[in-house]
Every structure is written in C-alpha cells, then in structure tokens.
Image (cartoon, rainbow, N blue to C red):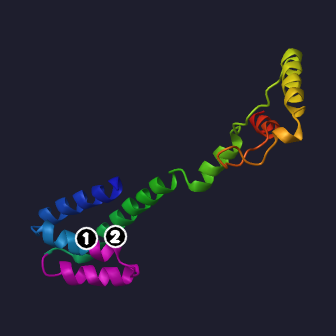
Amino acid sequence: MAAVAEFNSWLSSKLRASNADESIFGSYITGILEGDENNEEKTEALEGILGAIIETDLEPFIKEILDKWKICHNREAAASSSKPTLDAAASRLEGQKLATKEERAYTEEERRIKEQILSQYSQLSESEHDDDDEEGRPVRPIRNSLKTLT
C-alpha cells in the first residue's frame, strides 16, 4: 500500500506541475494503470486523456508515468510476497514440538494402594451390582468408574 500511495502522491504533484486537476485526472490515470490492458493500450488511453491538458510532448510524460507505476507496483508486489505465507507458517509449526500428555509415573506405594482399592471393590457380590438403584436410575459398577478415572 505504501508504494501505491507513493505513486499517487508523485502523480498528483506531476499533474499539478502541468496545471491539470489531479483529483479528476489522477483517478482516471490510476484506473487505466490498474486495468488488465497491455502497455500499448494503456499508452493510447493515457494519450487520449492527457492530450488535451498537457502542452508538452506527451510521449516522455506517459513513459515516465508508466515507468513509475511499474516500479511502485513491483515494489508493492515484492513487499506482499515477503509477508509470511501459509506454507511458511505451516513449516514453522511442523518444526515445533507438539505438547503431549506425559504418562504419570506412580511410585510403588501408590501402585499398591491403587491395587488394594481395586481389589476391595472387585470383591463385591453380584447382588450388590444391581442394574438400577432405588429410584430406577442405571448404576455403573464402581470398578468401571475407577478404571476410567485412572
């Protein structure tokens, strides 16, 4: 954007020096330059617009406009291509270590306590493993609940 603003400022001063209204002709010229036409078509369109207002030789004036536009446009394209792309960001992310959940290492004492608790609950009789409680809600065995917690 800075390169385009630089071009617009340059063009305005150039048009003012030629006693042309930069607010009107500047937008016309910029519109022509931004078009998809080739340089020959752009030159013809600029000659049509500037021929009535520029008293000096048009050819060097138009060549200067086209050259300045090309320089500013190339500078703008180079600046935008130097911005990080999605591929560059993806490759940087690939190089970073992903956060992973580490398995907790239990001490022997913790393992022994865990086994005692599990063995205590595994000794429940079948009659204590009703499928529903008093209010009709399903009951999951405690052992399965403990396994999901660990």
Extent of the magenta region = 30-53
Residue annotated with mark 1:
61
Relative to residue 132, is residue 55 drawn left or right?
Answer: left
Q: Residue at x 83, y 19 (%)?
A: 110
Distance from the alpha carbon under mark 2 to that under mark 1: 9 Å
* Quadrant position of the C terminus in the picture: top right
Residue flagged by tag 1: what amino acid is it? Phe
At horizontal 24% and vertical 81% (from top left) the residue drawn is 47
Q: Residue 2 appears at what percent x and percent y?
A: 33, 53
Q: Which of 90 and 104 is in front in this view?
A: 104
Instruction: State if disc 1 and disc 2 touch (CB < 8 Å).
Output: no
Say whether disc 2 or disc 1 marks the residue closer to the N-terminus. Answer: 1
Does residue 132 sit above or below 128 in this rendering? Answer: below
Which quadrant: the N terminus? bottom left
Q: Main secondary structure of the magenta part?
A: helix
The answer to if 31 sits in the magenta stretch is yes
Which circle marks residue 137 in the picture? none
User: Residue, x 88% and y 22% (percent of image)?
Assistant: 116
Residue at left 9%, top 67%? 19
Q: Give the class, few, some or many, for how many residues have Cα within 10 Å of label 2's Cα (few <14, many ≥20).
A: some
- Residue 93, percent across and down? 65, 45
User: What kind of residue is marked 2?
Assistant: Leu
Is residue 23 found inside the magenta-colored segment of the image?
no
Q: Where is residue 96 in the image (x, y as percent from the top left)?
A: 68, 39
Label 2 sits on residue: 66
For mark 2, give the secondary structure.
Answer: helix
Q: Bin the neighbour count of mark 1 within 10 Å (Cα to Cα): few under 14, some 14-19, many 20 and up.
A: some
Q: Is residue 37 left or right of residue 44?
A: right
Q: How far across and down, in percent of the image, does residue 99 sit?
A: 69, 36
Q: Is mark 1 on a helix, strand or loop?
A: helix
Between residues 25 and 136, which one lies in front from this camera angle? 136
- Which-is-in-front pick, marks 2 and 1? 2
